[in-house]
Image: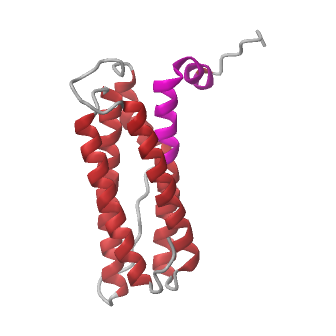
Amino acid sequence: MAGQSTDLEKVALALKTEQDGNSFYTQAKKQVSHKLAQAAFELLAKEELRHVALIRALGETLEGGGGVVEPNSPTRKSLEADLKTIYGEATEEGTGELEPGAAYETAIELEKKISALYFEYSNACESDEAKRLFDALYREEQDHLSLIEDMHAYLTKPDEWFIDRDGVMLDGG
């Protein structure tokens, strides 16, 4: 992942990465039949576009134009709240072709790679603006990863998911 020596080169790769992420989530939404997966991928596609805008603004700042880039990062809870109403309908199926578990697994790997890239960048950038933005993007990608892992667990291990969620104790304690 390393190899970008300047902050502007890092911005260029991050921009391409987020655009590719948006394309992946947009296609995944079209190809899965599971309503929760569709909603999750739509939300994440929008998040990637928001990241594109932030990274473009950083690029303009680094090139001498624009002001300070201040990301307005959503929390993991706010991302989940956007999906909460659809949890009850998550078993309803559409007509997609991609198995949702496999789509989530691919998304998990994608988010892990993007998180690692932004962690590296946040520690390697020279400008304070770039460090701040890549650190914020790293935290957001970690939230995305957590959300996707949670939805994957809901889909693949619903009994465990409900126990973890509701804090049910099986030993009667």
User: Height in image: 9 above or below 90?
Assistant: below
* Residue sitting nearer the eye, 71 or 169: 169
* Residue sitting nearer the eye, 49 or 156: 156
Where residue 8 appears, x then y in whole percent? Answer: 38, 83
Where residue 93 appears, x then y in whole percent? Answer: 28, 20
Q: Is residue 154 magenta?
A: yes
* Residue sitting at x 52%, y 57%: 139
On the picture, is 94 further left or further right than 76?
left
Q: Assign the magenta stretch its main secondary structure.
A: helix
Where residue 38 appears, x then y in whole percent? Answer: 29, 34
* Residue sitting at x 54%, y 23%: 157
- Visible in this render: residue 164? yes
On the picture, is 83 further left or further right than 27?
right
Where residue 4 appears, x then y in whole percent? Answer: 46, 81
* Residue sitting at x 41%, y 36%: 102
Residue with the most extreme bottom position:
64
Q: Is residue 33 magenta?
A: no
Q: Report which quarter residue 170 is drawn in.
A: top right
* Residue sitting nearer the eye, 41 or 58: 41
Magenta highlight range: 145-165
User: Height in image: 39 above or below 52?
Assistant: above
Q: Quadrant of the C terminus?
A: top right
- Visible in this render: residue 75? no
